[in-house]
């Protein structure tokens, strides 16, 4: 790289950081920290990204290519490269990006993990996806599989870290290994209080990857971020998390996806409302009728009136609001459906074990259930502290 180009990049970075002042600067925007690595020897690069992978107002892919990086492949997670696919919807496995000519490879559906053929012609994989800090949000599962493959096939990996909007607390039951799935691969609580870079450090250096592989890993941290920071996302990280409020309520409301209660998919405010045709009582006066929308082509209870609660103006607290699902279970009024979807037992995968479902079914109170989480949360909090890159929130277990 010429001295002139290095000078231009440095000037661009200084101007970019000055523009942000004390706002949080994501790792992707810190080009001076990683661009020279990717450009050295014309390295062949793959990028794991989606619609959140922005450098200012420009997508990371366009930024890298404009600066001379040899981007050969684009890997896409759940919801696809542009972020429009439904949760769980199959994303096309391969294709060519019309704008850049790079090959697009889906890491969702039948090909969760990059194979040898995907990586054999790459020197580096760059990972840049906005996470929301919740165990069943599948981007961290994609992260784990990419880390494993890079370790197995000796491809270096760079993670461009981003702030965690739910990074200011930890809460929820710890997943038991026999319940591991793509919506939860590691024994962590539902809310784990780590950025995606910190999480990557933990699963690599705790030996959680298959065959205990340790990829050549470099993390580009954020600037001006701590675990006490208030994080507002300008781009929805997925189609049904449209607002900061939805992201904040997501750890609590997503548990309903293992029941016959809608979380508002097919409305303008998913994960800010919940309801069902089978919820009765004075508490559930709010009504909505799901219909097909972008990101929810066939929502639960499509065309049916759902009775529930509107949380759009209710601020989420720094814990999972377990009372929502406990109270809904008590108010269930259906002879056709049990409250929990016992055919799929998806609730157990989301919760990380069967214990939460059994406790709710047994009529345990929120406080009684929460007390059972405390010892595991204390142990996990000590573990996570080994891998933090940023100032932590106050210890909640003193």
Image (tube, rainbow, N blue to C red):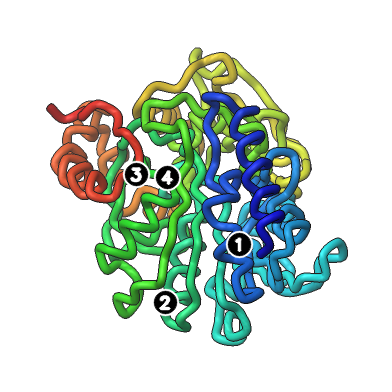
Give the residue number, with chain letter if any, for mark 2. 151
For the residue pair 296 and 21, the one nearer the viewer reads as 21
Which of the marked residues, 2 or 4, is nearer the chain's N terminus? 2
The location of residue 161, given as percent across then percent down, is: 49, 48
**Residue sitting at x 17%, y 37%:** 374
Give the residue number, with chain letter if any, for mark 3. 389
- Tag in front: 3 or 4: 3
Which of the marked residues, 3 or 4, is nearer the chain's N terminus? 4
Q: What element carries label 1?
A: strand
- Tag in front: 2 or 3: 3
For the residue pair 61 and 13, the one nearer the viewer reads as 13
Check residue 48 in the rendering and tell me which mark sits there, or answer none. 1
Q: Compute the Cα span from label 3 to label 4.
A: 9 Å
Q: In which quarter of the image is residue 70?
A: bottom right
Verify CB contact (< 8 Å) between mark 1 and mark 3.
no
Q: What element carries label 2?
A: helix
For the residue pair 175 and 83, the one nearer the viewer reads as 83
Which of the marked residues, 1 or 3, is nearer the chain's N terminus? 1
Which of the marked residues, 1 or 2, is nearer the chain's N terminus? 1
- Neighbour tally class for label 1: few under 14, some 14-19, many 20 plus, Cα within 10 Å: many
In this view of the protein, can residue 264 be seen by the observer? no
């Amino acid at each position: 790289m010429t001295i002139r180009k290095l000078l231009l990049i440095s000037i661009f970075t200084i101007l970019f950081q000055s523009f942000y002042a004390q706002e949080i600067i994501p790792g992707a925007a810190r080009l001076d920290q990683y661009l020279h690595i990717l450009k050295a020897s014309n390295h062949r690069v793959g990028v794991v990204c989606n619609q959140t992978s922005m450098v200012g107002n420009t997508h990371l892919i366009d930024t890298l290519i404009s600066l001379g990086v040899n981007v050969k492949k684009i890997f896409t997670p759940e919801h696809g490269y542009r972020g429009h696919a439904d949760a769980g919807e199959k994303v096309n496995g391969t294709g060519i990006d019309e704008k850049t000519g790079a090959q697009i490879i889906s890491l969702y559906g039948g090909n969760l993990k990059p194979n040898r053929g995907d990586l054999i012609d790459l020197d580096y994989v760059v990972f840049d996806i906005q996470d929301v800090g919740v165990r069943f949000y599948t981007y961290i599962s994609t992260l784990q599989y990419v880390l494993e493959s890079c370790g197995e096939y000796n491809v270096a990996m760079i993670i461009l870290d981003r702030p965690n909007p739910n990074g200011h607390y930890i809460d929820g039951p710890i997943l038991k290994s026999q319940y591991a799935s793509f919506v939860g691969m590691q024994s962590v609580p539902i809310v784990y209080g780590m950025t995606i870079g910190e999480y990557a450090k933990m699963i690599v250096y705790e030996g959680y990857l298959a065959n205990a592989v340790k990829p050549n890993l470099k993390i580009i941290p954020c600037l001006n971020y701590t675990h006490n920071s208030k994080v507002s996302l300008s781009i929805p990280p997925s189609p049904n998390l449209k607002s900061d409020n939805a992201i904040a309520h997501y750890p609590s409301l997503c548990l309903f996806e293992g029941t016959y209660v809608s979380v508002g998919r097919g409305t303008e405010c998913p994960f800010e409302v919940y309801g069902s045709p089978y919820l009765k009582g004075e508490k559930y006066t709010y009504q909505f009728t799901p219909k097909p929308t972008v990101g929810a082509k066939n929502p639960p209870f499509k065309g049916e009136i759902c009775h529930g609660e509107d949380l759009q103006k209710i601020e989420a607290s720094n814990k999972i609001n377990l009372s929502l699902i406990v109270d809904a279970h008590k108010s269930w009024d259906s002879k056709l459906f049990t409250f929990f979807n016992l055919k799929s037992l998806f609730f157990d995968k989301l919760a990380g074990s069967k214990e939460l479902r059994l406790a709710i079914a047994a009529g345990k109170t929120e406080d009684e259930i929460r007390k059972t989480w405390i010892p595991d949360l204390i142990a996990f909090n000590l573990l996570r502290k080994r891998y933090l890159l940023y100032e932590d929130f106050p210890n909640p277990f003193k």
